[in-house]
Image (tube, helix red, strand yellow):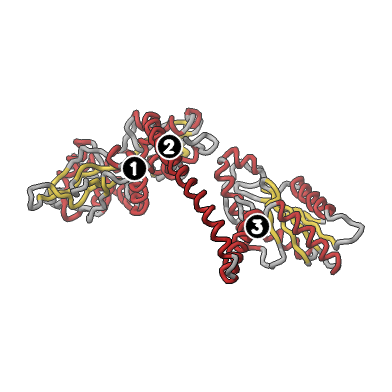
């Protein structure tokens, strides 16, 4: 199960929800829904949430033969909006429980002043809370909706909307009778389709479902996994899939909301049992593989004696071992998070370059870089986003440093070093300023920084010509002192000796 440290509930909030003013016309709002490809619009005035208008409202009003001419969105919006404030949220499960209890798919989030700051939907939850293990072993047939409302392709779209409004459903499957007298699904009409047709001014009372339905269907089998269903929804950017059985007969519907049901504690308990059984089975398989591996080792020892007599085969094995050792060395020298050199490799390389430039008597420059207010960033956005920031900063180093002898390394935590052999102070200062500018140009939001509303770095630069009577550590100490000076000067700047 995902822990709070691994997942922060505020990551499930879309902080840029689709909004409109109460004076907007209903027709314009429907057009906005169709163009934005979202299922809702929030009605806001001076930051205050007044109501919500969803695809389901479009279906309901259409089923009631409601004409929208002359009406504003304030006339038809849902005013009793279920919402949550940031102080009420304890974790993601609290949000899910609230949405389930009220049977809603849109949960606005307000701050302590009662002003709108964002919205939570099944789509935003799935983007950040991807329970891969939870849906990898569950089957579609376990969580699909088996009660499927169907209609003939000759049914008018108006009748379709009335079916959807009456049954409070988001889609109707369009079927035709096959040669065996059975219903054969040929298409689907969803709330999204109703919004699209309304925006295009279709005559709902005369248009038949077969003319405007979404087809062909993208069905999924009831014995497929929920993980496969999730991937298929992501691939086709759809919210629901028709489910068929082994004989290709319609047997249900699976939706985005169905996928989120696996986060229910009872569902999780069932999953734990399944995973435990899987672990037991895999343990047995591993034991068998270990036994087989022991036999293979013995066989390999025998083969080694044979191979040693064959010089050509021996060379091939030696080459493979060399490649493997090179890969192991690369892993040992690299920082696993950023892909840059690690502290160990930097220390060795620094000593090597110091000795070389001592003989040649040319400058050696060092840049120390620290991410400004990085602890505040982690506290605000979570460590997963913090790790992603470090990776993006590392890419800036890789794209900026071009010479083969130059080296960028992760020195520790959010601190980096850049070693620049045969580089004078002016060249190092220029490179440090380029890095400072490029990091800021990433436009990574950082609302907890006292320097800027986006992520910044501070850099200290030092240069020396190695001498016999001087320790290499003096260059590191000078660069670190300049970094401290940059922080004392307000951060987001470059300081140098």
Describe residue 240's horizontal placement relative to residue 167 as left or right: right
Q: Are marks 3 and 1 in contact (CB under 8 Å)?
A: no
User: Circle 2 sits in a helix, a strand or a loop, which is it?
Assistant: helix
- In the displayed structure, does residue 269 sit left or right of residue 331? left
The answer to whether mark 2 and mark 1 are in CB contact below 8 A is: no
Label at residue 329: 3
Task: Let me know if residue 124 appears in the view.
Answer: no
The secondary structure type at the circle numbered 3 is: helix
Q: Nearer the viewer, mark 2 or mark 1?
A: 2
Where residue 43 appears, as percent x and y from the top left, is: 38, 40
Q: Which residue is mark 1?
A: 256
- Report how far apart the C-alphas of labels 2 and 1 lie in the structure: 31 Å
Label 1, residues with CA under 10 Å away: few <14, some 14-19, many ≥20: some
Disc number lying in front (3 or 2): 2
**Residue 286 visible to the viewer:** yes
Rendered image: mark on residue 280: 2
Please name whichever residue, 440 or 20, is drawn nearer the observer in this view of the structure. 440
């Amino acid at each position: 199960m995902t822990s709070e440290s691994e997942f922060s509930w505020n990551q499930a909030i879309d902080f840029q929800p689709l909004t409109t003013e109460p004076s907007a016309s209903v027709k314009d709002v429907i057009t906005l829904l169709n163009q934005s490809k979202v299922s809702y619009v929030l009605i806001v005035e001076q930051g205050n949430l007044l109501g919500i208008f969803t695809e389901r409202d479009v279906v309901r009003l259409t089923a009631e033969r409601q004409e929208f001419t002359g009406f504003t969105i304030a006339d038809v919006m849902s005013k009793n909006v279920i919402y949550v404030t940031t102080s009420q949220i304890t974790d993601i499960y609290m949000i899910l429980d609230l949405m389930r209890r009220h049977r809603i798919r849109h949960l606005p989030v307000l701050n302590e002043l009662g002003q709108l700051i964002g919205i939570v939907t099944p789509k935003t939850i799935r983007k950040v809370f991807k329970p891969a293990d939870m849906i990898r072993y569950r089957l579609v047939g376990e969580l699909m909706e088996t009660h499927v409302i169907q209609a003939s392709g000759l049914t008018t779209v108006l009748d379709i909307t009335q079916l959807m409004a009456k049954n409070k459903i988001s889609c109707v499957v369009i079927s035709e009778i096959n040669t065996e007298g059975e219903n054969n699904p040929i298409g689907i009409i969803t709330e999204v389709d109703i919004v699209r047709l309304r925006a295009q001014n279709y005559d709902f009372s005369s248009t038949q479902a077969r003319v405007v339905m979404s087809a062909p269907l993208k069905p999924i089998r009831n014995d497929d996994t929920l993980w496969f269903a999730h991937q298929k929804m992501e691939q086709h950017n759809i919210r629901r899939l028709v489910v068929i059985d082994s004989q290709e007969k319609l047997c249900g519907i699976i939706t985005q909301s169905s996928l989120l049901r696996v986060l229910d504690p009872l569902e999780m308990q069932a999953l734990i049992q399944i995973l435990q059984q899987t672990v037991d089975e895999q343990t047995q398989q591993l034991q068998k593989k270990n036994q087989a591996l022991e036999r293979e080792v013995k066989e390999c020892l025998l083969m080694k004696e044979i191979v040693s007599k064959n010089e050509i085969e021996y060379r091939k094995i030696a080459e493979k071992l060399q490649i493997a050792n090179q890969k192991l060395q690369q892993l040992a020298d690299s920082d696993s998070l950023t892909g840059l050199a690690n502290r160990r490799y930097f220390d060795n390389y620094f000593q090597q370059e110091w000795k070389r430039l001592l003989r040649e008597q040319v400058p050696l420059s060092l840049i120390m870089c620290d991410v400004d207010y990085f602890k505040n960033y982690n506290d605000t956005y979570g460590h997963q986003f913090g790790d992603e920031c470090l990776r993006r900063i590392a890419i800036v180093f890789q794209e900026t440093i071009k010479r083969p002898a130059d080296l960028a390394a992760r020195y520790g935590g959010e601190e980096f070093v850049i070693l620049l052999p045969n580089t004078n102070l002016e060249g190092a200062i220029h490179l440090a300023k380029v890095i400072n500018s490029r990091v800021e140009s990433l436009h990574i939001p950082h609302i907890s920084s006292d320097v800027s509303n986006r992520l910044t770095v501070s850099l200290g630069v030092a240069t020396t010509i190695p001498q016999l009577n001087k320790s290499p550590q003096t260059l590191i100490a000078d660069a670190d002192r300049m970094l401290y000076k940059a922080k004392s000067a307000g951060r987001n700047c470059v300081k140098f000796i």
